[in-house]
Image (cartoon, helix red, strand yellow):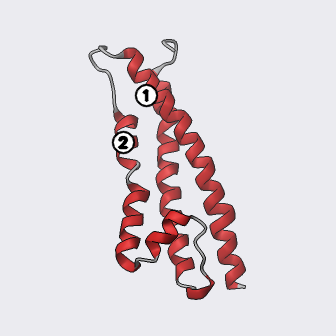
Amino acid sequence: MMRLDVDVLTKMIWPLFVGFICLNFLDVYTTTLAMNFGSLFHEENPIAAAMFDKQFQGYLLALAFKYLPVIPLFYIVFVGDGQGKHPLGIRVVKFTALIALTGSDILLLYVVGVHNIMSLLVNWT
């Protein structure tokens, strides 16, 4: 684990973090567009569906839950060990973030690309 270069890990995490944020925004945007279809819209996520049933307050709560993971991920992307006190801890955290962001981006890419956009295209045609 100590062979991992923190700068290389950070350079790998940064685009994954930006992709995570962009895909979250695109997910919210496409879901909001789909919600405008009214009766044609059906949320597949049972937790989000329960929140959307609560109208505007539920929508705000869903947004808060959607963007809450950005806060610790932002910290992880920019955390450093300038004094060299925690070299192993920084590497473990950055490596874990690399794995988590890779999986999250793949999942969000599927959700947005396949599920949301395809649903919108089917409903618009």
- Nearest the viewer among 68 and 113 is 68
Kindly indicate whether the residue at mark 1 contacts the one at mark 2 (C-beta within 8 angstroms): no
Q: Amino acid at mark 1?
A: Val
Question: Separation of disc 2 and disc 1 at Cα?
Answer: 11 Å
Where residue 32 appears, x then y in whole percent? 50, 75
Q: Amino acid at mark 2?
A: Pro
Residue bearing the label numbered 1: 93
- Up the image or down, 53 lies above or below 114; here it is below
Q: Quadrant of residue 6 in the image?
A: top left
Where residue 61 appears, x then y in whole percent? 37, 66
**What residue appears at the point 48 percent right and 12 percent down from the top-left corner?**
2
Q: Quadrant of residue 85 in the image?
A: top left
Regarding residue 28, the answer to whether it shows in the image is no
**What residue appears at the point 45 percent right and 31 percent down from the top-left corner?**
10
Residue bearing the label numbered 2: 72
**What residue appears at the point 41 percent right and 48 percent down from the top-left corner?**
69
Where residue 81 appears, x then y in whole percent? 32, 21
Secondary structure under tag 2 reads: helix
Q: Earlier in the sequence, mark 2 or mark 1?
A: 2
- Decide: few, some or many residues near mark 2? Use Cα within 10 Å; few <14, some 14-19, many ≥20: few
- Quick one: quadrant of the C terminus? bottom right
- Image check: 59 left or right of 84? right
Secondary structure under tag 1 reads: helix
Q: Quadrant of residue 111 in the image?
A: bottom right
Where residue 78 appears, x then y in whole percent? 35, 35
- Up the image or down, 115 lies above or below 125; here it is above
**What residue appears at the point 43 percent right and 28 percent down from the top-left corner?**
93
